[in-house]
Image: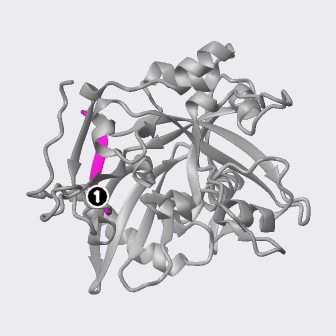
Amino acid sequence: MCYYNGQRVSRDEFIRLMDLEKAVMNYDFLDQEIHEGFNYGNIAVLRPTEDKCNFDIVQMEWGFIPSYTKNREDVKKMRFGYKDGNGKWHQAYTTLNAKGEELLMKDENTGREKMFRKAALERRCLILSSEFYEWRHLYRLNKRTNQPLKTADKYPYHIGLKNKDYFFIAAIWQNWIDKDTGETVDTVALVTTEANPLMRQIHNSKNRMPTMLPDELAWEWMMQDLSEERIMELATYQINTSEMEAYTIEKDFRTTGTPTKAFVYADVPELTYEI
Amino acid sequence: MLYKMGNVFENSKFEIEVNGLKVVVIEHTLRDQQIFRLVFDDNRAPLVITSAKTWAGEVWTSIPQGRQKEAELFGKEISKHLKT
């Protein structure tokens, strides 16, 4: 006889509830709808099972940690930058994203594999998302000189796929062990590609976009043994502008509770879909 | 760098009110099983509940254990909502 929460249940039911409990504990990403990369929180990732016949939904820390990183202190230094003993500032190095074009790179001088190569060859996965947000930078003209101002006005856009509730983003993962504490965690980087004509208008400060893969390519990316050439093709895949939709939203959309509500700015030119 | 992700695992979302307390209820499927995640507007921690078969019949239970009274109270309201 077993008890769960003070209720008398069969052994089978007890095992089911304990299993569910474990799953719930491992899914704290459900607490949050919108994930801000720079929080380095946990997100849901689709990862193939060992036999590659199916996949699991697992939780990973967003922000790839290379295996050579010694401990959390070094992770913090990498992510946020730090001042060394001589007072010299070392810039932060962001591994939330991995550039598709550079995934398989080796160091030209030493021939050593760069950070993402092994993961791209052996540990490809997918991130599920329903929409994302980017900021368009527009430079007003100086009334006196008629030259663009140095500081841009930034307008947020809600971006998704037409008639699709969600989409797959190519990603790679890395298991990392803290050499000091023995903590082990799976970490993930989202793959990006060059912006398509629509995203070039929106994310005009960086001209990048996530590598969104249609269902069949997503399956291929995650499940199949691929040549380096094919990995590169998929990693740099550009979804067609005609499949996407984007519109401006309120600047404080993160706190309004309505992050999908369109908001029109009089001074923002309309996007062009046919290019 | 903002992505909306959590909602892709939602099946449905609705709001109930219990004794003046507003509760957002989000239905998920985890390991092929139905669970409900409850978010309260009085700052208490979110609660996950599911239905369980007991010797006394089907009851609502919290996942993990420890918040059985809340599970029963809010679960009853969810059942009512789903029937309407």
Please tell me whether residue A155 belongs to the stretch shown in magenta. yes
Q: State whether residue A219 appears in this view.
A: no
User: Magenta: predominant secondary structure element?
Assistant: strand
**Location of residue A194 in the rendering, given as x and y in whole percent from the top left corner:** 45, 32
Q: Which residue carries the number 1 mark? A: B82
Name the one closer to the observer, B40 or A185.
Answer: A185
Tally of marks: 1
Task: Find residue B72 and report its horizontal and vertical position in percent.
Answer: 45, 74
- Give, as a single range, the part of the protein colored magenta: A151-162
Judge by depth and name the residue closer to the eye, A139 or B79: A139
Tell me the SS state at disc 1.
helix
In percent of the image, x 37 and y 70: which residue is there? B76
Which of the image's four quarters has the C terminus of chain A? top left
Q: Is residue A262 left or right of residue A192?
A: left
Residue A122 at x, y percent in the picture:
74, 28
Pinpoint residue A176: horizontal percent, then vertical percent.
79, 50
Using residue A230 as the reference point, say whether residue A114 is left or right of it.
right
**Front residue (pair A110, B7):** A110
Disc 1 marks which amino acid? Leu
Q: Is residue A43 above or below residue A45?
A: below
Please tell me whether residue B20 is drawn above or below residue A101 in the rendered image. Answer: below
Residue B80 on the magenta segment = no
> Dot 1 surroundings within 10 Å: few (below 14), some, or many (20 or more)?
few
The correct choice, above or below, for B3 with respect to A234 in the image is: below
The answer to whether residue A239 is seen in the rendering is: yes
Identify which residue is drawn at 54% across, 66% down: B56
Above or below for A171 versus B5: above
